[in-house]
Structure formats: C-alpha cells, structure tokens
Image (spheres, rainbow, N blue to C red):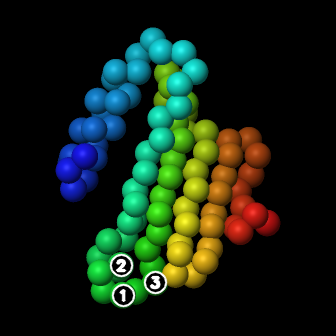
Amino acid sequence: VEAGSEASHAALTKALSEADGEVDRLLFIVDPIDGTTNFQAGLPIFCVSIGVVHLPSQQVVAGVIYNPALQEMMSAIQGQGAYLNGN
C-alpha cells in the first residue's frame, strides 16, 4: 500500500469488499510506524500497531500496540480485556 491515509483507506475498503461471503477469515492490519513524524524527530511517541479483523463480520477481534522506545505493549482480545505488558 502506498503511503498516506487515502491509500490506506482504499486498500482496506478493497480488502473488506473482497471478503463478502467468506467464512472465518482473519485480516491483519499493520502500521509498522504509527507516529512517523515523531519517529523522524526522535521523539519516543511512536509505535507498531496491529489490528485483527474477523471476516466476513468485519468485527475487530484483537489488537496490539507496541512502543519500542518505552518498552510498552498494549494488547486486547475481544471479550477478554486489555493489558499493558501482560498485566
């Protein structure tokens, strides 16, 4: 996917529309550097973001956000709560 929010939106819309009628498939959405401007400026406010969407329901079922500069990992699974560094 090309850089930019419009390209990301177009790619996600395409992936979701192609999933119509499919059974029990997971779509992983990854932003390798969420906070690119902060990363480039050397600020420790950036992260790696991963979301997991169940198809065809389009429900977000899990997510992980990791900030390597602060060594913090936030994770959540639908119906099971959210955690910071496993706690």
Residue at which label 2 appears: 39
Instruction: Relative to 50, say whether 87 is above or below.
Output: below
Which residue occupies 27% across, 38% down?
11
Instruction: Relative to 25, say whether 21 is above or below.
Output: above
Q: Are marks 2 and 1 in contact (CB under 8 Å)?
A: yes
Residue at which label 1 appears: 42
Q: Secondary structure at mark 3?
A: loop
Q: Which residue appears farthest toward the right when viewing the image?
A: 87
Determine the image quadrant of residue 20. Answer: top left
Q: Are marks 2 and 3 in contact (CB under 8 Å)?
A: no
Measure the alpha-carbon separation of dots 3 and 1.
Answer: 6 Å
Label 3 Cα crowd, 10 Å radius (few <14 / some 14-19 / many 20+): some
Which residue occupies 72% across, 61% down?
83
Identify residue type, mark 2. Answer: Phe
Which residue occupies 25% across, 46% down?
1
Label 2 Cα crowd, 10 Å radius (few <14 / some 14-19 / many 20+): some
Give coordinates of residue 58: x percent, y percent.
49, 30
Measure the alpha-carbon separation of dots 2 and 3.
Answer: 7 Å
